[in-house]
Image (cartoon, rainbow, N blue to C red):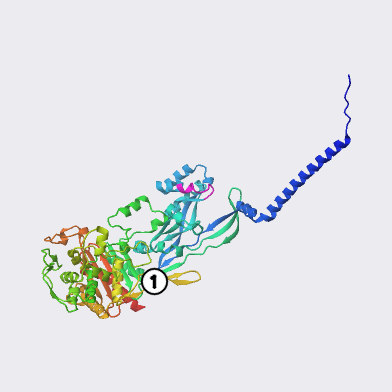
Amino acid sequence: MSRTYIIKDNSVENRLFLNRIIVAFVIILLLTSALIVRLVYLQIVGHEHYSSLAKDNSIKIKPLVPTRGMIYDRNGKILAENMPSYSLELIPEQIKDLDDTLKRLQKLLNIPDEKIQQYHKQRKREKRFASTPLLMNMTEEELAKFAVARPFFPGVDIQVHLARHYPYADLASHVVGYVGRINETELKTLPVAEYQGSSHIGKIGIESSYEAQLHGKTGYAEIETNAQARAIRTVNAVEPTPGANLYLTLDIDLQKTAYDALDIYNGAVVAIDVKTGGVLVFASRPGFDPNPFVVGISNGAYQALNSSDSRPLYNRALRGLYPPGSTLKPFVGLAGLEYNAIGTQHRIFCPGFYQLPGVSHRYRDWKKWGHGSVNLNDAIMQSCDVYFYSLASALGIDNMHDFLQQFGFGEKTGIDLVGEKAGLMPSRDWKRRQRNQSWYPGETIITGIGQGFTQVTPLQLARAMATLANKGNIVTPFLVDKIVNADSTTHGPEIHKGTLPVKQENINSILTAMVNVVHGERGTAKIIGRNISYQIGGKTGTAQVFNIKQDAKYNENEIEFKLRDHALFIAFAPADDPKIAVAVIAENGGHGGSVAAPIAGKVIKQYLESDNEN
């Protein structure tokens, strides 16, 4: 049997080996090149990107909350300030048994259950090593109790913060407003960069309207942290810019006089500088203490305010809607002169009632036996309803609407506060549009004395009075006079002015009649014209709360207090060079002359006396 022998070919094996070496070298070379390219990219091309990623892992941005600006009255008295406030704060990581600690703290400091619930909600949003407040604005008694027991509460400590404080409490609550905790809805709409770290925001009043100016600009600090996000050191910081300080036109002493003068009556007093439109008084009674809202008012306390029959949370000066009653008569009289429906000496006979031709219904005068023969001056001075029934019929509702709207009735004044109501100056178009009904002649009649559908705010009345006293030069009411930053001072809102196209002799006739209301022998407000060295022009008003049947009698002593007529008064002074215009509404006060007029008289007297001293 033959055998096969394989002879080894060294040259082939060498060539094969060499080829493998070359392939391996090429692969190594390619991999090395790829590695070099990648390193070049990481170190040079992508350096900035990856460097910032690495930095972000160790540097955290901490917002630095600005100090909120303060609010002053026209004389520099503080209306809103930042006071040191002590809060009880817990660090869960340092507490072995959190629930037990909370129970002991609750017993020691008498903490309500809702505060405990609020703490748990807030704690869930924080890291375990973060300090979270349980109790804010601690009293001296609470501080003393905790100080004694402090060694038994590891991980619990007292921290000091600045908290908003309102020294005049309910006196200025409706104008200054208050700040409160930012809620979820607000959080979605606020600029993130500016409100990082902020916990409070203006809710109502000046605090809300001027939030952007009062808040300031948030700063930031670059904090180096470890892997557990604990702060190690501050690398860099940009300090926050404090909020601007606001100086109002409001006189808080005059505000107190007006507020106290309302006494037992709910209502409002608004006083305006006739020349500028600056608001001197903006009182709404009752008010409320805004301080509990800063730290979080309790549910029970809020419900008590919200359900009160006196409605202390309601801003009557800005949003209260009332029939103007006879305070509308000077403006209706001016409309009569402007439309040539009457002359200053036009007389009618007032028998105590008015009837439309062919209609049996009697529109009664407040004076049962009538005023006799009266002209425009007499009708304003004595507040003769029959005269203005007749004039309203002659003018018609469309002319009254168009003319009175020029004085701002039925429109917002434009004051620098949010939430103002426009009131209502009715017309044919309004009734057809809103109620799909025709306008009736009887509705025109009662509109002439400020009843029916007509509704005004105290602010609107004060502005209309200021415009009339200013001889038709329109003023726009405003509250903020100066905005003072660290490096600049600017003035408040632009004052939009204009002049009404009315004859000066007609305005003078109306103003003279209003002076006779206070200083005339038969004036309805002559009670406030005694023993003063200046003259006041004014007009009393009474607004019905409910309708009285044709043959029924109104007896104030036999009806509930809350059903009594509202008392109103508008005024300007001094008559020869008006400086202040005032509107007063005393709910259920009954009589403008005996209740509302003296309130205005006190405000005017104090303002003119202090103005003379300055």
- Residue 128 within the segment the image draws in magenta: yes
Q: Going 33% across and 52% down the picture, which residue do you hit?
A: 303
Q: Going 13% across and 74% down the picture, which residue do you hit?
A: 348
Q: In this rendering, would 249 be left or right of 541?
A: right
Could you tell me which quadrant the N terminus lies in?
Answer: top right
Q: What kind of residue is marked 1? A: Arg
Instruction: Tell me residue 137's x, y (percent).
Output: 43, 55
* Residue 522 in view here: yes
Instruction: Tell me residue 451's x, y (percent).
Output: 21, 64
Which range of residues does the magenta coloring cover?
121-130
State the residue lying farthest toward the top.
1
**What secondary structure is the magenta-colored segment mainly?**
loop
Q: In this rendering, would 357 be left or right of 304?
A: left
In this view of the protein, which residue sits in the foreground, 282 or 119? 282
Could you tell me which quadrant the C terminus lies in?
Answer: bottom left
**Helix, strand or loop for disc 1:** loop
In this view of the protein, which residue sits in the foreground, 469 or 151? 469
In this view of the protein, which residue sits in the foreground, 328 or 389? 389
Instruction: Tell me residue 13's x, y (percent).
Output: 85, 36
- Residue 396 within the segment the image draws in magenta: no
Question: Which residue matches tag 1?
Answer: 74
Q: Going 47% across and 42% down the picture, which residue do you hit?
A: 99
Instruction: Tell me residue 211's x, y (percent).
Output: 43, 62
* Quarter holding residue 43: bottom right
Q: Going 10% across and 69% down the picture, which residue do you hit?
A: 369
* Residue 112 in view here: no
